[in-house]
Amino acid sequence: MTWFESFVLGLVQGLTEFLPISSSAHLRLTAAFAGWHDPGAAFTAITQIGTEAAVIIYFRKDIGRIISTWARSLFNRELRHNHDAQMGWLVIVGSIPIGVLGLTLKDAIEGPFRDLRLIATTLIVMGVVLGIADRLAARDELGGRHRAAKQRKSLDDLTVRDGLLYGVCQAMALVPGVSRSGATISGGLLMGYTRESAARYSFLLAIPAVVASGVFELKDAGEGHVSWGPTIFATLIAFVVGYAVIAWFMKFISTKSFMPFVIYRILLGIVLFALIAAGVLAPDAGETAG
């Protein structure tokens, strides 16, 4: 991998990690369209540490409060009913599904799951799911001619059941094209949470999973065509760009619909299928590119 490739891929990672369009799919597609080697699952997991560092800094006050209260609640029973202490446990519970499935499906994640036909399918299917979830949220928020607006849930209403369901949605993002934020936000909206609450918990829930995955994949960094230098450079680029994107995205969702992302996902999936059908792209494009 050249330094230019690492810059472009780091930029793509930072731009797409927090948007519901799948960063892993875009890294895979960028390499395929450019005729580069597939950067691989290890490179993707490590560069995601950069974007998660951006999450930690952006939500540093929330994270610090949650960790502090949760740790103190282990020895102080009175704090165990505190929302921040409970949030600590809910993040742990929600991280279980992706941890179990990530280890179980490791070979598939690094191989068959990176097939461009599967990526095109997940882009379209999850785009439709996100569209339905967004439409239901809008209906509750705006009401209708014969229907009053409905109050949606906040993170204060988060339960163990909902936290676990969020975790299952997050685990679906092990397949490129699903999108970690897209799946968890869709799940949250379908469970009746507000857009902001769904996004906030999605970002907090991703921290343990992404950091653990990145650390786990460190042993594979520097192997094959991807060396340590470009990987670190791409991670730094992803951090800087990712911080700017998350700040914008949190403001965007407070007043806007997810429909632009829905349309983008579906169109990208259709174009990808068309290119594969026309023979312009092979399903395994990038895996053998030089």
Image (cartoon, rainbow, N blue to C red):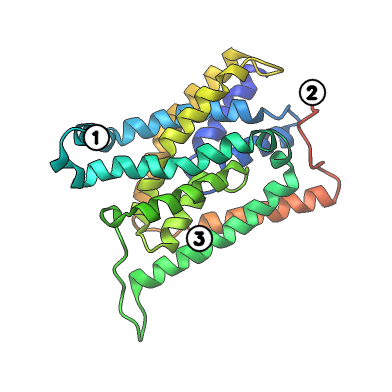
Residue 15 visible to an observer of this rendering: yes
Say which of 122 and 233 sits in front.
122
Residue 39's x, y, as percent?
A: 66, 27
Check the image and report above or below for 236 versus 177: above
Quarter holding residue 152? bottom left
Q: Amino acid at mark 3?
A: Met
> Which residue lies under the disc numbered 3?
259
Q: Position of residue 21 (x, y in %)?
A: 55, 47
Quarter of the image for the N terminus: give it.
top right
Q: Residue at x 50, y 60 (%)?
A: 259
Local SS, label 3 = helix
Residue at image location 44% in from the left, 40% down from the top: 95
**Residue type of the residue flagged with mark 2:** Gly
Where residue 148 appears, x then y in whole percent?
30, 79
Per the image, the residue denoted by label 2 is 290
N-term mark: 2 or 1: 1
Image vertical order of residue 89 relative to residue 107, above or below: below
Q: CA distance from mark 1 to mark 3?
A: 31 Å
How crowded pointer 2 is (Cα within 10 Å; few <14, some 14-19, many 20+) is rated as: few
Residue 86 position (above or below residue 124) = above
The residue that disc 1 covers is 61
70 left or right, relative to 115: left
Q: Residue at x 37, y 80 (%)?
A: 144
